Amino acid sequence: GILSRLVALAEGGALICGHSPVAPAGMMDDEGRWNALLERLRAGRNVHLGEAPGDVLAAAGILPDVDYGVRENINFVHRTLPGTDIYWINRPGDKACAVDISFRIKGLAARVWHPENGKIEDVTYRTEGDRTLVRVDLAPDDAVFVVFSGKDEDGANTVEPAGCQIAATPSEPWKIEFQPDRGAPLSTVMETLAPLTESSEEGIRYFSGAATYTNTFTLGPVAEGSRFILDLGDARDMAVVKINGMECGTLWKLPYRTDITEAVKEGVNNLEVTVVNPWHNRLIGDKQPSCNKAVGFTSYTFFGKDSPLIPSGLLGPVVIETQVR
């Protein structure tokens, strides 16, 4: 059975740790033979019953594949290809952070790949013994790939962080056009950005669908090599950005930021942000006593008239930044 297999592994030199068996698993087991096998298992040179696996591996000189400190909550998957090691790194949480992550690898250059837009960026890293320590900047609920490939004899790289300064802010008020036949007016004007759910007009408060925000911003002379980033602040829940009619990205998670360098120009620029939210709020609106005609339909009633709404629309603050290294 399993116990005899464990004994064979232990006597073959395998490193074994975990909880000690306490009793035979089956009623037909020979208890005397089972006890004899357990004694043989405990006598194994590399058997550490009752000890924590991490302590056993550390004592044997086997360090973690990925080490990120006890205060971080990071998930990872490691895949090895010829000449390349790929680590998927995920950190749940609602705060952005920079994490120093130690990988059990050396001699290869490290880069971070961003799956949502295909961007590949250089990162700061250094070699410490048989490991490489990489500084990884993570957005809220982020997931990136840390890719090691290409020989690096120096074992180190330094990337100076880009500095950002505000280049412009959209003027106010904002014009908003609503997807038709969703219970909202065709358009409205919002003096200052706020969740649609705070509107006094029921058609807007309970709106679900696509709402298109339009505005303008003005840039001074654009220096050669300048890069411009649009930061929407917060949006609920997905946003498509257009600058001067050019689409500049679909944003669906924090941070709601996108590069608009190719679309901007000196002077007045037109900004269009289409924000889409789920059916949650409209289904609640359909349950209000004042609702004469339901907009949505579900075969099961998920919400009542007093169910809480979730914030929707473009929340901001919206700024246009220029990057300086």
Image (tube, rainbow, N blue to C red):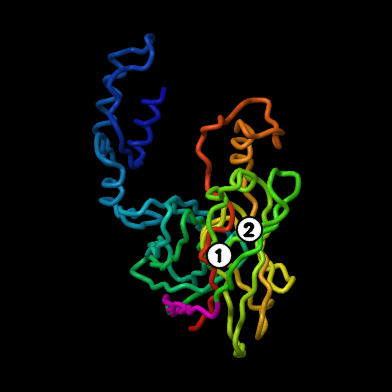
Rounded to the nearest angstrom, the CA distance separating label 2 from label 1 is 9 Å
Q: Is residue 317 left or right of residue 277?
A: left
> Could you tell me which residue is drawn at 71 percent across and 44 percent down?
182
Q: Nearer the viewer, residue 108 or 314?
A: 314
User: Which residue is under mark 2?
Assistant: 239
Q: Is residue 308 left or right of residue 59?
A: right
**Could you tell me if residue 161 is visible in this image?**
yes
| Type of amino acid at the residue the image marks with label 2 | Ala
| Looking at the image, residue 223 lies above or below residue 65 | below
| Looking at the image, residue 30 lies above or below residue 270 | above
Circle 1: is it few (<14), some (14-19), or many (20+) Cα within 10 Å?
Answer: many
Circle 2: is it few (<14), some (14-19), or many (20+) Cα within 10 Å?
Answer: many
Q: Nearer the viewer, residue 36 or 291?
A: 291
Secondary structure state at the residue bearing disc 1: loop
Residue extending farthest top: 28
Nearer the N terminus, badge 2 or badge 1? 1
> Could you tell me which residue is drawn at 48 percent across and 76 percent down?
152
> Could you tell me which residue is drawn at 29 percent across and 31 percent down?
19
Q: Is residue 11 one of those drawn in magenta?
A: no
Q: Are marks 2 and 1 in contact (CB under 8 Å)?
A: yes
Q: Identify the mark at residue 264; answer none if there is no mark.
A: none
**Could you tell me if residue 145 is visible in this image?**
no
Q: Position of residue 210 (x, y in %)?
A: 68, 52
| Type of amino acid at the residue the image marks with label 1 | Leu
The residue stretch that appears in magenta: 155-168
Which quarter of the image is occupied by the N terminus? top left
User: Which residue is under mark 1?
Assistant: 232
Q: Is residue 157 one of those drawn in magenta?
A: yes
Q: Position of residue 224 (x, y in %)?
A: 62, 90
Secondary structure state at the residue bearing disc 2: strand
Q: Quadrant of residue 280?
A: top right
> Could you tell me which residue is drawn at 51 percent across and 32 percent down?
306
